[in-house]
Amino acid sequence: MFKPIEVKALADYRVWIRYADGSEGEVDVSHLAGQGVFKLWDDDEQWKNVRIADDGAIRWSEEVELCPDATYMKLTGKSPEEIFPKLKSTTHA
């Protein structure tokens, strides 16, 4: 897992994230806004309440969080096989 060390809510449902490996930048999560549990983000104060959970998740509440691996891939443009090399050796029947 890639460990986020800093996170900040930005305008237009974007979050700025810095990871322990030095990668940093903005991730657009607007495609999730207003859907299901992500309706929480409709409240601007709730949106700004982003933090890093003890398990590394990017969290707004107990019910609303993003996977740090998924946001790392979105931020860096890397594929799952690039960040999890063992996936390359997995064969499908």
Image: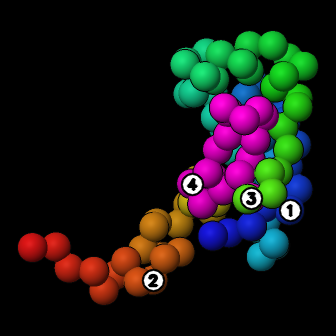
* Mark sitting earlier along the chain (3/2): 3
Task: Give the Cα distance between marks 1 and 3.
Answer: 8 Å
Please tell me whether mark 4 sits on a helix, a strand or a loop: helix
Residue 14 appears in view: no
Instruction: Name the amino acid type tagged 1.
Output: Ile
Q: Which mark is residue 70?
A: 4
Instruction: Name the amino acid type tagged 2.
Output: Pro
Instruction: Name the amino acid type tagged 4.
Output: Ala
Q: Is residue 89 magenta?
A: no
Q: Which mark is residue 85?
A: 2
* Mark sitting earlier along the chain (3/4): 3
Q: Position of residue 31 (x, y in %)?
A: 55, 27
Please tell me whether mark 1 sits on a helix, a strand or a loop: strand
Assess disc 1: are there few (<14), some (14-19) or many (≥20) residues with their C-alpha within 10 Å of its C-alpha.
some
Q: Residue furthest left?
A: 93
Please tell me whether mark 3 sits on a helix, a strand or a loop: loop
Residue depth check, mark 1 versus mark 3: number of the one nearer the observer: 3
* Mark sitting earlier along the chain (4/2): 4
* Mark sitting earlier along the chain (1/4): 1
Q: Position of residue 92 (x, y in %)?
A: 16, 73
Q: Which residues are magenta?
A: 56-71
Viewer-closest of 20 and 57? 57
Assess disc 2: are there few (<14), some (14-19) or many (≥20) residues with their C-alpha within 10 Å of its C-alpha.
few
Please tell me whether mark 2 sits on a helix, a strand or a loop: helix
Which residue was labeled with disc 1?
Answer: 5
Image vertical order of residue 88 relative to residue 8, above or below:
below
Q: Position of residue 42 (x, y in %)?
A: 74, 13
Q: Which mark is residue 34?
A: none
Q: Residue at x 88, y 56 (%)?
A: 6
Which residue was labeled with disc 3?
Answer: 56
Marks 1 and 3 in Cβ contact (< 8 Å): no
